[in-house]
Image (tube, rainbow, N blue to C red):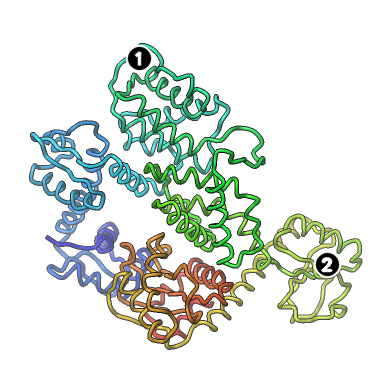
Amino acid sequence: MLELTHRQYKILSTILQANSHVTSNILINSLSITRRTLINDIKSINANDKLIDSDNRGYFISQGKLNEVEDILMGYQNTKENNNEILKYLLTSRTKVKQDKLIEKYYISESSLQKYIHDINHTLKDYSLQIIRQSNSYMIEGEETNKRVLLAKMIHQETESFFDDMNNFSSYFPNIEVEEVSQKVIEIVEKENYYVPKYYELNFLINILVILSRNPFIKEMADAPSKRSKDLEKYPEIRIAHTIIDMMASNYMIQFINPTHVIQELDMCLYGFIQPKGNQYETPVAHFLSESFVNKIRKILKEVFQYYYLTSIDYESFLNVFCIHVNELIRRCSNSQNFTPTNVSVKHSSPYIYEIAVSIASRISDVFNIQIPASEINLIAIHIGYTIEQAVSDSTIAPVIIIAENYRNIGTNIAQKLTTNLKDKVQIMGFYHHLSDIPYRNFKDYFVISTVQFTDKYSKICYISPFFTDTDLQKVTEGINDYLKKKSREEFSGLFDRYISDDCFFSVNKKMDKYEAIRFLVDHAYEHGDVNENFYEQVLEREASSSTSFYGKFAIPHSNIQNANMTKLYIMVNHESINWNNEKIHLVFLILINHEAAKDFRKLYEGITEALYHSNTVFENIDKIKKIDDLKRYLLL
């Protein structure tokens, strides 16, 4: 049987669906691969039998091979989909599933079912779970906690692109009216004068659905509401939990076998998410948290912000809120309640903020002995993001010069509108009548706005009307954004030149995994005396917290300890591929940071991610990159 990679199956599928010739450029661009990789993949596909042919118009299915290719693709798709569907069905079933039912449901033979079960069990090993057969029936054996961890991962993978509709989760909760129950739960919470913050809501609802669907129950009409303890009634979480199970009984005839256990689980989940209604700007007071706990979080924030030279951050202003969040996070992690889909990722939108969140999460993990998944790191990043953006905003301010005929009136009016609409992006440096009045003529360092037209072709000036209309404001806003981007690129270019050299760049033609790639670069850094002998383990420790790969295209491994002997960039371009968490990448930047240059880490980190995110030029020309000057040509456009 032909065994191909997922990408090679996609190449076959693309050519088959085209019903005509497909050019190499179409395949390269649609799959984000190089020409060399495409040629190697075609060679692998044709290894045993020539399925793909080519001529000067492109690639096409070889004559007489159409049916064979269709069978190969159908078998691949069926295997992948059936594995997922059978696993999901067994995982969400409340009882053993008879073999005949599986065979009938998925239109497969007994021998095919055995193969699927064998493949699925290989996956389940990572979760200490196993599909076992008893009396011609199948079930998943293992700890309930592990089953919920697996369920979380499956939800993440399947709902990555449509997370905003609760109905999309219905297949994971076959015994629950997902959308209706979710709406009623929110209504119950609000009737108690509480609410769930929007960025928690999906996580919260999925956790509630998991609790309601995975606890054993019977279907029968309830005789009476659940018994409530007067001592516990003072806690809103307990009241809401009782109301939820009463609602499930009265509306859906679901009677839980062990309601006390269900209430306990709901209590823990509710405690981690619900907030009292009231003034949303009012700072919560964490009376229920010990002084020792608060001091531990205070110490973590202080260490991390000092580490990243964010000494201007007043973390005391949000310490209470953050302590409450961390306390809830610990509860969720301790009870495997982490079902947040990870497609809204601060890692990709604000990589530097996410990196700081990783450092905070790593310290929390060590102090409280818990494992923190990427979804929770994302929520930490959301909590600290605004504060960090404010702290680093000075580096993204455009110095503005205003030229106006009557600058005392017109210029002041323009300045007021600018500082009102772009207060975090501009700093007014002065008002002048004419270019010749300006004591400094190095215009590239300033953004010049003028209501007066000049013939000076050497000056880049943003011309506006004296009335500074909305159209003028839009023009100025676009100009300032372009100015700041250019300034950032120039600064990154200077840092890149400072911290890279020919002996730190490597062009490689060998398939690797991420560990081999990191080891390769770290070994060279060690040989040059730039790092100590523990650096490799430190980089892997950071990698274990959250992958340093981006967009399935490149990776920026580094240590969370700024103890390199020299600040440097070690770069590998691998013309074959590097298997980085099951993604094939070709470019790795290993950042070494010495504490004295720690301020440059953000600029390097954001500069690399920004340059590679907004342009595919590097990846389109990866085969041409053999030395450092080649990379600069495409990276520093």
The quarter of the picture where residue 101 lies is top left
| Quadrant into which the N terminus falls | bottom left
Question: Considering only vertical position in the picture, is 514 above or below 263?
Answer: below
Few, some or many residues within 10 Å of mark 1 (<14, 14–19, 20+): some
- The residue pinned by badge 1 equals 222
- The residue pinned by badge 2 equals 451
Question: Considering only vertical position in the picture, is 284 above or below 494?
Answer: above
Q: Which of the two marks, 1 or 2, is nearer to us in this view?
A: 1
Measure the C-alpha gap from mark 1 to mark 2. 77 Å
Secondary element at tag 2: loop
Residue depicted at x 17% and y 69%: 46
Secondary element at tag 1: loop
Q: Is residue 191 left or right of residue 520?
A: right
Residue 63 picture location, percent across and down:
16, 65
Viewer-proximal residue among 125 and 472 = 125
| Quadrant into which the C terminus falls | bottom right
Residue 153 picture location, percent across and down:
34, 48
Numbered label attached to residue 93 = none
